[in-house]
Image (cartoon, grey):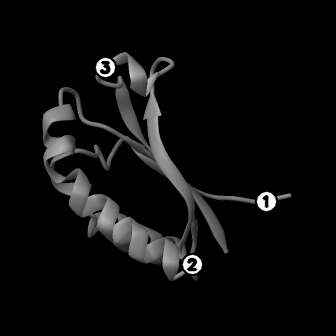
Amino acid sequence: MKFICYMVDKKGCLEARMAVRAQHLERAGKLIKEGKILSGGAITSEAFDPASGKKPAIIGSMMIVEAESKDEVLEMIKTDVYAADVWDLEASQINYYLST
Protein backbone atom coordinates (compact mmCIF):
# COMPACT_ATOMS: atom_id res chain seq x y z
CA MET A 1 0.00 0.00 0.00
CA LYS A 2 1.07 3.57 -0.58
CA PHE A 3 0.86 6.35 2.00
CA ILE A 4 1.40 10.09 1.85
CA CYS A 5 2.98 11.58 4.94
CA TYR A 6 2.83 15.28 5.75
CA MET A 7 5.22 15.95 8.60
CA VAL A 8 4.81 19.38 10.21
CA ASP A 9 7.90 21.01 11.71
CA LYS A 10 7.93 22.33 15.26
CA LYS A 11 8.21 26.11 15.47
CA GLY A 12 11.78 27.40 15.38
CA CYS A 13 13.40 24.02 14.65
CA LEU A 14 15.50 24.96 11.60
CA GLU A 15 18.76 24.82 13.56
CA ALA A 16 17.86 21.40 15.00
CA ARG A 17 16.84 20.22 11.51
CA MET A 18 20.14 21.27 9.96
CA ALA A 19 22.16 19.73 12.80
CA VAL A 20 20.85 16.21 12.03
CA ARG A 21 20.06 16.60 8.32
CA ALA A 22 22.98 14.43 7.15
CA GLN A 23 21.80 11.54 9.36
CA HIS A 24 18.22 11.97 8.13
CA LEU A 25 19.29 11.95 4.47
CA GLU A 26 21.55 8.91 4.95
CA ARG A 27 18.66 6.92 6.42
CA ALA A 28 16.23 8.20 3.78
CA GLY A 29 18.67 7.09 1.08
CA LYS A 30 18.67 3.55 2.48
CA LEU A 31 14.85 3.51 2.60
CA ILE A 32 14.71 4.74 -1.00
CA LYS A 33 17.04 1.91 -2.10
CA GLU A 34 14.80 -0.56 -0.23
CA GLY A 35 11.75 0.78 -2.08
CA LYS A 36 10.10 2.08 1.10
CA ILE A 37 10.30 5.81 0.30
CA LEU A 38 9.10 6.52 -3.24
CA SER A 39 9.38 10.31 -3.09
CA GLY A 40 9.96 12.96 -0.48
CA GLY A 41 11.45 16.29 0.44
CA ALA A 42 11.15 19.46 2.43
CA ILE A 43 8.05 21.67 2.29
CA THR A 44 8.65 25.43 2.23
CA SER A 45 6.28 28.29 2.88
CA GLU A 46 7.71 30.31 -0.01
CA ALA A 47 9.59 29.76 -3.25
CA PHE A 48 13.26 28.98 -2.70
CA ASP A 49 16.25 29.65 -4.92
CA PRO A 50 19.39 27.86 -3.64
CA ALA A 51 21.56 30.39 -5.51
CA SER A 52 20.11 33.22 -3.40
CA GLY A 53 22.20 32.35 -0.35
CA LYS A 54 19.10 32.63 1.86
CA LYS A 55 17.93 29.86 4.15
CA PRO A 56 14.79 28.10 2.96
CA ALA A 57 11.59 28.71 4.93
CA ILE A 58 11.09 25.01 5.72
CA ILE A 59 7.80 24.16 7.44
CA GLY A 60 7.82 20.38 7.16
CA SER A 61 8.47 17.29 5.10
CA MET A 62 6.49 15.16 2.66
CA MET A 63 7.01 11.52 1.81
CA ILE A 64 5.23 8.97 -0.32
CA VAL A 65 5.88 5.61 1.30
CA GLU A 66 5.28 1.99 0.32
CA ALA A 67 4.42 -0.15 3.36
CA GLU A 68 2.24 -3.03 4.52
CA SER A 69 0.37 -0.92 7.07
CA LYS A 70 -0.07 2.52 8.57
CA ASP A 71 1.62 1.19 11.72
CA GLU A 72 4.73 0.33 9.69
CA VAL A 73 4.81 3.90 8.33
CA LEU A 74 4.36 5.36 11.80
CA GLU A 75 7.25 3.24 13.11
CA MET A 76 9.42 4.42 10.20
CA ILE A 77 8.62 8.03 11.07
CA LYS A 78 9.05 7.65 14.83
CA THR A 79 12.52 6.15 14.38
CA ASP A 80 13.73 8.96 12.10
CA VAL A 81 16.19 11.38 13.68
CA TYR A 82 13.79 14.26 12.83
CA ALA A 83 11.13 12.75 15.12
CA ALA A 84 12.97 13.91 18.26
CA ASP A 85 13.34 17.66 17.73
CA VAL A 86 12.10 18.59 14.25
CA TRP A 87 8.73 17.06 13.44
CA ASP A 88 5.58 17.79 15.43
CA LEU A 89 4.19 14.26 15.26
CA GLU A 90 0.81 15.22 16.73
CA ALA A 91 0.23 17.82 14.00
CA SER A 92 1.47 15.54 11.21
CA GLN A 93 -0.67 13.32 8.98
CA ILE A 94 -0.34 9.88 7.42
CA ASN A 95 -2.96 9.02 4.82
CA TYR A 96 -3.50 6.33 2.22
CA TYR A 97 -2.36 7.41 -1.23
CA LEU A 98 -3.96 6.24 -4.47
CA SER A 99 -1.59 6.87 -7.37
CA THR A 100 -2.81 7.19 -10.94
Residue at image position (28%, 46%) is 87
Residue 69: % across, % down: 55, 78
Residue at image mark 3:
53
CA distance for labels 3 and 2: 33 Å
Displayed quadrant of residue 53: top left
The residue that mark 2 highlights is 35
When the figure is inspected, residue 27 is found, relative to residue 56, above or below; the finding is: below
Are there few (<14), some (14-19), or many (20+) residues within 10 Å of tag 1?
A: few
Residue nearer the viewer, 53 or 28 = 53
Above or below, comparing residue 60 to residue 73 in the picture: above
- Residue 81 rendering spot, x and y as whole percentages: 21, 61
Question: Residue flagged by tag 2: what amino acid is it?
Answer: Gly
Which amino acid, by three-letter code, is at mark 1? Ser
- In front: label 3 or label 2: 3
**Secondary structure under the numbered disc 3 in the rendered image:** loop
Sequence-first tag of 3 and 1: 3
- The residue that appears at 65% across and 68% down in the rendered structure is 2
Q: Earlier in the sequence, mark 3 or mark 2?
A: 2
Using residue 18 as the reference point, say whether residue 100 is left or right of it: right
* Residue 58's disc number: none
Q: Quadrant of residue 24?
A: bottom left
The alpha-carbon separation of the residues under discs 1 and 2 comes to: 16 Å
Which residue matches tag 1? 99
